[in-house]
Amino acid sequence: MKLRLVLAAVLASGLLSFLLPVFHKAGSVSRAADGGPVVIATIPVDGGSFGPVGVAVNPVTNRVYTANGLGSSVSIIDGAANAIEGTVALASSPLAVAVESSTNRVYTVGLNSNDVSVIDGDTKTLVTTIPTEGLSPSWLDLDQTSNRLYTCNANSHDLSVIDSEINSWLAMVPFAADVRPSAVAVNPVSDRIYVANNSSSSFETLCSCITFGTSCPCGNLPAGTSGSVHVVDGGTNTQIAAIPAGTGADAIAVNPATNRVYAALSIWTSGETDYGIYVIDGVTNTVLTTIPLNGAPGGVAVNPVTNRIYVANYGDNSVSIIDGGSNAIVGSVSGGSGPFGVAVNPTTGHVYVTNPLNHTVTVIEDPALPPTATPTPHPVVGSVGGKVLVPPAALADASSEPSGPPDAMVGIWVGLATATAVTAAVAGWHVVRRRS
């Protein structure tokens, strides 16, 4: 079942009576071979009758943002205290959230609105809304090197391109009528945008309920349903490739250091299940391997420092930890009820997982490990999109303002105090705008 689109149906209809939560003891852990990870906190979030869903992290401010679905709000979590420090009310029911670390602007999309809500992370207030010019935006991601925000629009079969600096719609990338975009992820190094498609027929045959289990009583998707990952050139705003992805990709993430793309498959079809992670080579646009999962995944996130991938599995209430070098599952953690959204703070190594059914965020601590070697990494580059990259060691600390003109774009690593773990690696670059 395509959970992201099912969420759209539920939020639009308000039908929640068929939710079947499966409660596991929060905080139980199956440690990886290296002694981690471990749950360090469970944070209650007032997400209304269903939420939180999406989650994002600002590693500069150590703040975590959750999109609270039917709570019509965004919660702000202090990453040091693991406590809610504020809530921003919205008119929409937000599913997804992204944050621009340099400006501390927070962006959300909601299924009962075709707009992007823009929040000032400093003042915790709604700044403006931006029309996407699309229908039913379900997910979004941000390219901080180009100040481009992308929203995938399920009902209009397209991808909106928004200038996050001036809060204005720029362009639309159309897809075929049989493409229902469900998630989007950006590689700022290659300037490629990856759009997950969980197939055309899925939306018409969706249940009007959500079931966390082994079957969908409202009717499965037809056999033969197919999905794909669509690759967009950020420079030309055109599709350049379409990669087959089993019965449908429902979530997606990118590791810019290794140029690997991770597409989560969480599909129920007639007589079959297909749960796993497709690992895609961003250079050749081909599937390298598939990593099987025991439960249906809802979200996926990458820590580019440790080359670990985190998958929130709402199907069995767990979080899987994958080593990006070996493509092997190296650990799992039992989360809350229906874990769905996942985000990583590479500075602290903390992983944040939303649990919509028991209204919590699980905080996982994963030890800072050197990354496992991955074949064919990105070559070292001196600039991204015309912005100069300055070695992290040249800066006093990750939050310092670089010297130079106010409009200079400088790459720094916000995940580490020193360059030790990212020597000559593209993984560590994070582009920020120096404020005047």
Image: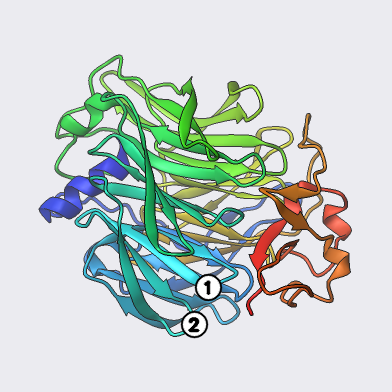
Identified by mark 2, the residue type is Asp
Left or right of 251 on screen, residue 330:
right
Q: Nearer the viewer, residue 311 or 435?
A: 435
Q: Amino acid at mark 1?
A: Asn
Q: In the structure shown, which secondary structural element does the residue marked by tag 2 occupy?
A: loop
**How is this picture coloured?**
rainbow
Q: In the rendered image, which residue does mark 2 sit on?
A: 122
Q: Residue at x 40, y 58 (%)?
A: 54
In the image: residue 409, left or right of residue 319: right
| Residue 318 numbered tag | none
- Quadrant where the N terminus sits is top left
Q: Are marks 2 and 1 in contact (CB under 8 Å)?
A: yes
Residue at figure coordinates x 25%, y 69% from the top left: 71
- Front residue (pair 333, 191): 191
Q: Residue furthest top?
A: 224
**Residue 94 placed where, x, y %?**
30, 61
Residue 361 appears in which quarter of the rendering? Answer: bottom left
Looking at the rendered structure, which numbered label has been put on residue 104?
1
